[in-house]
Image (spheres, helix red, strand yellow):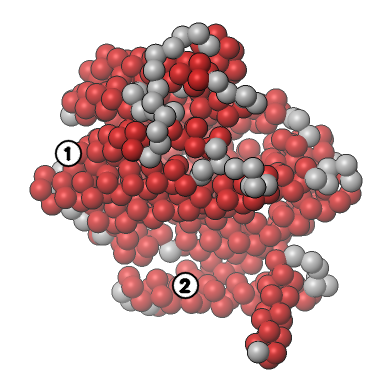
Amino acid sequence: MSDVTPKKALLKGAFWTLASRWSVRLLGFANTMVMARLIRPEDYGIVAMAMLVVGLVQTLLDTGTGTAILRMKEVTRDDLDSAWTLRLMEFMAAASVLALVAYPAALYFKDFRVTPILLVFAACIAIQGFATMCPTIAQRELNFSIDFRIAVIGKLTGVLVTVAGGFYFRDYRALVAGIASSYLISTLLTYLLHPYRSTWNTTKLREIWHVTKWITFSGMASFTLRKGDEFIAARVATTQNYGYYNVGADLGQMPTGEVGPAIMRSFLPVLSTIQADVERTRQAVLKTLLAINTLIAPIGAIFSVMAVPATLLLLGHQWEPAARIVAVFAVLSSFQIMLSPLNTLLTLRGHTKVQSHIVWQEFLVFVLAAIPLVPAHGIVGLAFARLIGVVANCTLLTWNAWRHCGISPRDVLLTLARPWLGAALTALAVYGVLQVVDGVLWQILAGSVSAGLLYASWCALTWQLVGRPEGLESTVLDRFVAWRHARAAG
């Protein structure tokens, strides 16, 4: 691998990561579209409840062994085998805990079908513990395609089994079979795609644990913040309503959830190269803030307005109650990504403790908002509590970016004003279009076309009015002019 430069390795890794992410998401989305028409919302709710417990247990016991190996400058056979041994113990512990909590979890969720599902997943996790360190070794060898193959083949297998099970069982057992098959095929692939074979070794456990113990604590906090609302929803809602909440939240976050992280992936390394120049760094943050919001603001606002026809088209009429959840999470997801350049700047300047405080304060605001909203409005109130928490996060993030990095709230608000005002006006216009158009498909087509024309016109007009600054519009115009010249020359 000596001929591979760091830049080439970075680009190659980014390509395979994006390819894996998009492939898995598209397969999952296609699976949801098919299965939403074969099984009931409550079937999704039952399996989602079980997966919440699986996620919690695995997070609490996750030792981050792969991260420890990737951080080492030199890796020996003892290091690899000790990491595998620690991970095997972690997976066996997770499987044992899942088996022990299977019955109490059913009592918590008030549905005893959760118990056998958790026992099946416990067996799968025990088997998965024997997977080799193949993905981690491949990353060290700059062979990023192995991760892609494991993720995509595992997901594709799960989708095929789930759909087949959907036609056969017509209930939640199809989802369980699909998830279990994905676990098992991913484990098998670690043996088929790389010659390395792990063996029991405890000689380096202490050194690896010294590196990974903080990863465990960080993972606990992250999971609590990401899934706290779902644990509340699973407790207070019926199985059917929890199915609406779980699937609606996923669908609502999907558009901006895929666009935002893809844009931000390379921002930190780029920003780090100019961090010595304070003014240049400030301008880069504000330009990126404008670019990312020019894209995500209309996606979130317009998808929220079109939540009902989108839900009916993608999931079917039995999922119509989930449309309200889709609408709230479409906006919520945009707000989560809206100030991500400021978050990146705080990371660059080393203010990770500040970021941790912001996240926990967001969670506190969410809990306080949920106390009155959930009894009054049920799972929709819970979704709004999440939205209020995210708004609090944005406020705190803006304040701390000013306090620690010199990015003033006035600059942030002025940067956000143009894309978000345009998105709001476009969303209002699309809402009006939906009121006069009949039929789900025609509403989607009319809403999408009108949204595209109106928002593009807004961007072009306001860009001219503010003096044609350098940004997304100028980049698009430059590419168009270059294409026209190339075409004329050809």
Around disc 1, counting alpha carbons within 10 Å, would you say few (fewer than 14), some (14 to 19), or many (20 or more)? some
**Where is 341 relative to 117, above or below?**
below
Asked if residue 213 lies left or right of residue 105, the reply is right
Q: Position of residue 158 (x, y in %)?
A: 27, 44
Around disc 2, counting alpha carbons within 10 Å, would you say few (fewer than 14), some (14 to 19), or many (20 or more)? some
Most extreme residue toward the front is: 2
> SS of the residue at dot 1?
helix
Q: Which mark is residue 444?
A: none
Mark 1 and mark 2 in contact (Cβ < 8 Å)?
no
User: Disc 2 or 1, which lies upstream in sequence?
Assistant: 1
Question: How many marks can you see?
Answer: 2
Asked if residue 335 lies left or right of residue 284, the reply is left
**Where is 465 relative to 243, above or below?**
below
Q: Amino acid at mark 2?
A: Ser
Give the camera-side residue of 268 and 254. 268
Quarter of the picture holding the N terminus: top right
Q: Position of residue 378 (x, y in %)?
A: 37, 39
The residue sitting at 61% across, 31% down in the picture is 359
The residue sitting at 48% across, 56% down in the picture is 255
**Does residue 184 show up?**
yes
Quarter of the picture holding the C terminus: bottom right
Residue beneath disc 2: 448
The residue sitting at 60% across, 72% down in the picture is 455
Q: Position of residue 357 (x, y in %)?
A: 66, 26
Residue beneath disc 1: 173
Q: Position of residue 201 (x, y in %)?
A: 44, 12
